[in-house]
């Protein structure tokens, strides 16, 4: 009997093997200045600088060095860190230059800063370079935080204050990326705890637990904040559009695409702040239960979804491990989904079905928080 046009082969891999194979393949991508090729934002197709991809690979390279002890990964991680310390990456000493999109900020809101802070904070102790932690803390401290609202502001690369980042997953990702700083810096812990104190107010969900896209502080607090500081007037937009977006199917699909990012970031925060009372709030159970819905599976399994996570299965698995302690078979199933649809086992990179190969390949860093789980998967090769 002749073989079908597409041969399905069963393979086995562990999460640590996935990281090591990807990191080793990435060594061929690294450039002379230590950076990695920049990607394009898959949602808006915006050109980015090498900052985010380099930061993601720095996180992975540091983790793989921890796992293997192989100096080749330490050398590559040091080179990537050196790039992030360069004037090209942080030209004015305020925030990192993360994107070049006409009419938009170059810092890429909070999300553009979370990646380098995470990478530097992870690499600092691993590479025994305290200056990396200091750089990450410097960027963290450059972002004003409003204790009453419980949100961070965006800061342009030249230090210009741009008001709050209204996108909730940006706020959550920024907070979770900063969590690695709390052991060394009390100031980081204090701000993140206040962020969690206000989270139950700022996060809004649909009745089934799907997290809404924008942070939405209490209306009275919003009014007082804007009255005191008029440049925060954009907060009013969240109140104006919330009802319209609640009825939009396109917005709901977008929010479903971002749900893995939100629950992954919240899981990282729970790991760092396990005793915070916010985890007893009812929205937590609802947001985790939403991943069992048919709608979630359909959107996450759709490889043509342009909004949201590039590693939704890995992110869902980590959230379920943290919040729900699901059976290992369920966790492995979510991880294998990403490997089957995104991991090219010939090139050892997350480049299958990618809107942008450079950006998606670097997204393997999401697996650094997972334990070493064995996964069976079917890899389809043309």
Image (cartoon, grey):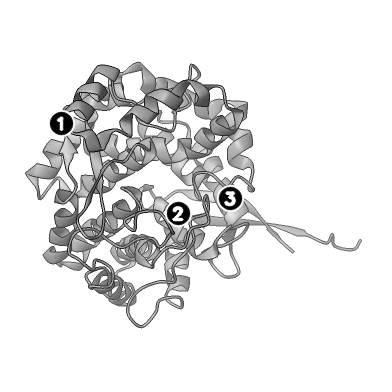
Q: Which mark is residue 376?
A: 3
Q: Nearer the viewer, mark 1 or mark 3?
A: 1
Residue for badge 1: 147
Q: Is residue 117 left or right of residue 324?
A: left
Whether label 1 touches label 2, CB < 8 Å: no
Q: Position of residue 30 (x, y in %)?
A: 40, 76
Question: Where does the C terminus fall, quadrant-wise?
Answer: bottom right
Q: Position of residue 169 (x, y in %)?
A: 38, 39
Nearest to N terminus: mark 1 or mark 3: 1
Q: Nearer the viewer, residue 297 or 140?
A: 140
Q: Nearer the viewer, residue 21 or 202?
A: 202
Residue found at the far right of this picture: 1
Q: Is residue 221 visible?
A: yes
Q: Within 10 Å of the Cα at label 2, are there few (<14), some (14-19), or many (20+) other Cα atoms? A: many
Q: Is residue 151 visible?
A: no
Q: Position of residue 335 (x, y in %)?
A: 52, 46
Q: Nearer the viewer, residue 41 or 351?
A: 41
Residue found at the far left of this picture: 186
Whether label 1 touches label 3, CB < 8 Å: no
Q: Residue at x 24, y 42 (%)?
A: 153
Q: Residue at x 18, y 50 (%)?
A: 140
How many angstroms separate mark 1 from mark 2 (CA)?
A: 38 Å
How many angstroms separate mark 3 from mark 2 (CA)?
A: 11 Å
Tell me if residue 369 comes above or below residue 272 in the rendering: below
Residue for badge 2: 15
Nearest to N terminus: mark 1 or mark 2: 2
Q: Residue at x 53, y 67 (%)?
A: 348
How many angstroms separate mark 1 from mark 3 (CA)?
A: 46 Å
Provide the secondary structure element on which disc 1 rests.
loop
Nearest to N terminus: mark 3 or mark 2: 2
Q: Within 10 Å of the Cα at label 3, are there few (<14), some (14-19), or many (20+) other Cα atoms? A: some
């Amino acid at each position: 009997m002749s073989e079908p046009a597409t041969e399905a082969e069963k393979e086995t891999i562990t999460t640590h093997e996935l990281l090591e194979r990807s990191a080793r393949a990435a060594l061929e991508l690294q450039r002379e200045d230590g950076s990695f090729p920049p990607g394009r934002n898959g949602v808006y197709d915006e050109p980015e600088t090498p900052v985010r991809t380099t930061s993601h690979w720095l996180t992975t390279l540091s983790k793989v060095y921890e796992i293997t002890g192989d100096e080749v990964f330490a050398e590559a991680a040091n080179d990537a860190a050196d790039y992030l310390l360069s004037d090209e990456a942080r030209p004015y000493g305020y925030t990192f230059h993360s994107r070049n999109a006409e009419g938009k900020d170059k810092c890429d809101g909070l999300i553009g800063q979370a990646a380098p802070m995470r990478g530097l904070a992870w690499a600092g102790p691993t590479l025994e370079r305290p200056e990396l932690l200091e750089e990450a803390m410097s960027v963290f401290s450059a972002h004003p935080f409003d204790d009453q609202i419980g949100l961070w502001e965006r800061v342009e690369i030249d230090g210009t204050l741009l008001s709050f980042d209204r996108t909730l997953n940006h706020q959550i990702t920024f907070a979770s990326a900063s969590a690695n700083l709390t052991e060394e810096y009390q100031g980081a812990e204090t701000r993140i705890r206040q962020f969690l104190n206000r989270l139950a107010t700022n996060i809004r969900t649909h009745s089934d637990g799907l997290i809404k896209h924008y942070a939405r502080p209490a209306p009275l607090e919003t009014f007082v904040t804007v009255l005191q500081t008029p440049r925060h007037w954009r907060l009013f937009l969240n109140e104006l559009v919330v009802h319209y977006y609640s009825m939009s199917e396109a917005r709901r699909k977008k929010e479903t695409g971002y749900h893995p990012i939100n629950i992954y970031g919240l899981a990282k925060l729970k790991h760092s702040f396990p005793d915070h009372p916010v985890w007893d709030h009812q929205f937590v159970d609802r947001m985790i239960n939403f991943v069992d819905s048919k709608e979630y599976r359909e959107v996450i399994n759709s490889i043509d979804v342009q909004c949201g996570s590039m590693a939704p299965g890995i992110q869902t698995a980590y959230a379920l491990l943290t919040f729900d302690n699901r059976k290992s078979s369920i966790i492995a199933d979510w991880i294998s989904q990403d490997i089957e649809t995104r991991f090219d086992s010939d090139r050892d990179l997350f480049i299958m079905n990618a809107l942008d190969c450079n950006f998606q390949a670097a997204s393997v860093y999401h697996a650094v928080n997972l334990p070493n789980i064995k996964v069976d998967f079917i890899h389809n090769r043309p």
